[in-house]
Amino acid sequence: MKIGFVGLGAMGHAMAERLLKGGHTLIVYNRTRSKADDLIDQGAVFVETPADVARQAEVTFSMLFDDASTEEATFGKDGVATGLSQNAIHVCCSTLSLAQARRLRDGHAERGQTYVSATVLGRPPAAAAGELFVITGGAEEAVKHLRPLLECFGTQIFDAGRDPVQANLVKLSLNFMIYSTIEQMAEVFALNEKAGTDPRKIFEIMTNSFYTAPVHKNYGKLMVEHEYDHPGAPPVTLGLKDMKMFLEAGGDYDVPLPYASVVRDRLLSAISAGDADRDFVVLMERARQDSGLK
Amino acid sequence: MKIGFVGLGAMGHAMAERLLKGGHTLIVYNRTRSKADDLIDQGAVFVETPADVARQAEVTFSMLFDDASTEEATFGKDGVATGLSQNAIHVCCSTLSLAQARRLRDGHAERGQTYVSATVLGRPPAAAAGELFVITGGAEEAVKHLRPLLECFGTQIFDAGRDPVQANLVKLSLNFMIYSTIEQMAEVFALNEKAGTDPRKIFEIMTNSFYTAPVHKNYGKLMVEHEYDHPGAPPVTLGLKDMKMFLEAGGDYDVPLPYASVVRDRLLSAISAGDADRDFVVLMERARQDSGLK
Amino acid sequence: MKIGFVGLGAMGHAMAERLLKGGHTLIVYNRTRSKADDLIDQGAVFVETPADVARQAEVTFSMLFDDASTEEATFGKDGVATGLSQNAIHVCCSTLSLAQARRLRDGHAERGQTYVSATVLGRPPAAAAGELFVITGGAEEAVKHLRPLLECFGTQIFDAGRDPVQANLVKLSLNFMIYSTIEQMAEVFALNEKAGTDPRKIFEIMTNSFYTAPVHKNYGKLMVEHEYDHPGAPPVTLGLKDMKMFLEAGGDYDVPLPYASVVRDRLLSAISAGDADRDFVVLMERARQDSGLK
Amino acid sequence: MKIGFVGLGAMGHAMAERLLKGGHTLIVYNRTRSKADDLIDQGAVFVETPADVARQAEVTFSMLFDDASTEEATFGKDGVATGLSQNAIHVCCSTLSLAQARRLRDGHAERGQTYVSATVLGRPPAAAAGELFVITGGAEEAVKHLRPLLECFGTQIFDAGRDPVQANLVKLSLNFMIYSTIEQMAEVFALNEKAGTDPRKIFEIMTNSFYTAPVHKNYGKLMVEHEYDHPGAPPVTLGLKDMKMFLEAGGDYDVPLPYASVVRDRLLSAISAGDADRDFVVLMERARQDSGLK
């Protein structure tokens, strides 16, 4: 199939490459062209604007950093919406605020265009291995039509519902559970450390009993090893962006989220402590500081 | 080996039976004698007091409901301490406050007696299957000596350290993580339900992606099915007892525990709502109520 | 002096009338012209746009409902900025987000125009009596120049600093203290009510001992009398708007605000309970509900 | 009247002296006798035990540091209850946990003795000036009978109800409002300080507008001046003792107290930071630290 891909950051690039390797024809666009070089070597065609991508593709994926870049690449001058034909589909995989998710849904609807939200769970290496978790939201037929494409990079495809926004809320919710699990473990590690038990011991007990999920093992490990500065670490600022969007979602639906507010405060405090660019598991240090642990 | 067991509630009974099946000679005591009948049929000897148990056994286990019953059975008239000989060991498996855990440690020490804390993670059926997680605290030699016994009911034995109290704090910490994970999921379920997505769908996505631990699967399942009244459900009051002890532990070490306070408030609110005796996962209803979900 | 006034809601109207009674010439604009009728009878001149107001006035006040209406009336087509001359001053009294406060500051600066923020504390009756508290932010000379005008409706004029945004933050802070004091009293009233002591008794003791401020007396009274629906009651939605802006301010400066988050959750919960349009003291009912009080 | 007084700490001494100056005959007891010397010079009679005090007095006041000292001085060997006659009254003015307040109520009732709780608001200097606020709980007749005595040191006498415990809960509630107001101001001061506005300026605006209560003026002043170490400063440990009792009260009645939990965490964190013995307004430093303010 002729597939378009807009946004070739670490994540987008890995997903696009999987589609290419899946035997599809790939038309790509990225603000920094060089990021596309190796894909071009593998046969991808680079075009000058997101609109050009949409004009040639049956399905156009977009994977951009945030609300603003997504809005611009979709409804801006030479955006996807400008080129998208009636029988084509725009699939947005970005992590967005619900406000932006609604703008995409409604903006495409006004233009009589088909739009599907397909948010993804996992890091670039998982994408490269085709092991992402994909959460879709949109019209049943369109979602079914996309399935084989999503399976190029996704090991499991979950259907969140007919409203694309539902998929975005699920994504924000799953991200919240990461930060919330970190706070939960941070309180446990700090208390036991102060009582004289090495957090690595607690981590071992947790992850070999009831707390065996990747969310426990992956983040807990970084926490007890104090690995806050490894390459490609997702920074505190990213966590704050996620929590801001999740709390706004709570505001949209009048749902109090006490845990989310605690996490937000920890992240703000981490930034004030100078840890803005370190792995967000560094919020463990907030719990340690409040406990007088050096 | 001649093993004593004091306290034959659902949990204690299952553990005692495993020891018996392990080929050990069992001397038992329980306030309600009838609870011991089937063990007696299998060869266990029933005696009149905890002291009598301790007098005859090389190792005396105790598994009682709370601080008060443990204190009474240990240092009360005819308590374990009265009968425990110098070369015997008292192993307490109860979930206790750190204050009580210290009383046990110090009270036995004053008497020159050997005491080990061996807290357990899991429900009676897990005990009956020998699949508990055991966390030990105490003198290295004593702990090593007990290992084969603990393996009668424990699939994994973790060593928390040389101070028995450390094992009690680990147990309180792991229990906190249960309630905290429930609150975390409750916020996510309530928000998505209000946005029109069935919590069962969220549960499916969670438990098939990054949130695959027993703590997610077992409690999340009960939450989305609203199963608050199944037989043997651990009640809200038990959860509150655990959280009270965990927060007191935070107080002992001057460690703030914001998440634990949120859980405490939810449990108090659940009791005020009339749910004191329902499965503690019912605190999901507090999040639903605050969101205006009927 | 020739004074302009844009925005004649209950508050703006009372302030404008005070300026008129102060012997100043008044040029006014309001979207709904009828709101200006009585002022016109007293000699005020009504013009067609905010720009027309600014063109004729030496000092142009604006008092509008929110960020959007303020932005439109200032920098929109025919906005104040279009007509404001170099030696004139725009004084904005609205309660705004810090983001909007910065837009006003920077937008006027780019145009080489003088801008002062003069936020006010108090209700319309206080304005009509000239008993508002006014907090100014802006260039020293401009602020000094405005003093006599501000004294027309303000009993005390406080200088928050040279940056107009500081005055907006002080205003948001003082509003937060209202909601926060309500939550504080709600917890006390609910607990004592459940213990059998009439909250009116607690209110009497509080307000006759250490808790004698207007914030205690005015709001506490409404709370214990359950007066949630009196005419002109400031609604829960207004409280939520304020708290949203205050929490955003915390985000701007990376300052955790745990109390503010608790209040936000209470307000969201009040809206979910159907109390969106009732006096925001109704959040007392959230504390009562959580305590099982009917 | 023949009045007894047990417990001559700074507070008790000032109250006893007021009774003496009120023309009453005073029988006193204190563990450290020297504390009574000046009262003896003024005619007070020192006796050897609380029981001896109660034997001779028509009304015996007690003002002790905490639950334990109160329990000992009341129901211990040679305690007040041992000497109290049927037509005498024991009046306890201490700040106690509700559990201890109930023990006093029930212990005296079992003995057929009359007991009244008369908690006080204010510092020793206020007591010396007869300007305490007194909150009574107990049988109507007994309370009425005591009024003239309470007026010796109290400027206002409030009646909380017929159950003595109600007066204790009111006292804990009013203390909570002190700490809670401090936290509230700390968040405001920290945020504005980070935005470049001197907290002293905010304090001036607050205390000259809506936040004019002693609780704002007295504690706010210490906060903005960072006066954490003045002589006679009530320490963080005292604050923590109060909050512990207040939160336990919430537990007794199943009432969630989110603000109280935030304060508790701040106090624990202050102790971990090494501020245990400083004025509890030092919790302002926790808000500053979380905001990265040095």
Image (cartoon, coloured by chain):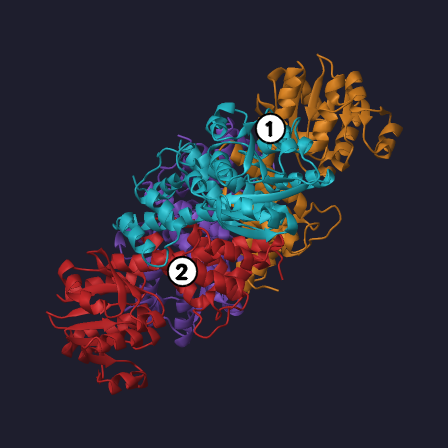
Chain colours: A red, B cyan, C purple, D orange
Q: What residue is at 77 percent from the left and 19 percent from the top?
A: D54
Numbered label tally? 2
In this view of the protein, which residue sits in the foreground, D214 or C142? D214
Is D271 left or right of B263, judged from the image as shown? right
Quadrant, the N terminus of chain D: top right
Q: Where is residue C253 in the image (x, y as percent from the top left)?
A: 49, 64
In this view of the protein, which residue sits in the foreground, D63 or B172? B172
In this view of the protein, which residue sits in the foreground, D142 or B125? B125
Is D82 left or right of B156, judged from the image as shown? right
Q: Is residue A129 above or below residue A258?
A: below
Is C167 left or right of D56, judged from the image as shown? left
Residue found at the far top of this picture:
D86
Q: What residue is at 62 percent from the left and 44 percent from the top?
A: B116
Q: Position of residue B256 (x, y in %)?
A: 56, 50
Q: Position of residue A197 (x, y in %)?
A: 60, 55
Label 2 Cα neighbours within 10 Å, binned few <14 / some 14-19 / many ≥20: some
> Residue tagged by mark 1?
D167
Q: What residue is at 64 percent from the left and 54 percent from the top?
A: D272
Give the numbered dot on residue C224. none
In this view of the protein, which residue sits in the foreground, D84 or C134? D84
Give the numbered dot on residue A214. 2
Are discs 1 and 2 less than 8 Å apart at CB?
no
- As shown in the figure, which amino acid type bears the numbered disc 2? Pro
Quadrant, the C terminus of chain D: bottom right
Q: Is residue B35 above or below residue C186?
A: above
Label 1 Cα neighbours within 10 Å, binned few <14 / some 14-19 / many ≥20: many
Residue found at the far left of this picture:
A87
- As shown in the figure, which amino acid type bears the numbered disc 1? Ala
Residue D138 in view of the camera: yes
Task: Chain letter for mark 1, please.
Answer: D
Residue C257 in view of the camera: no
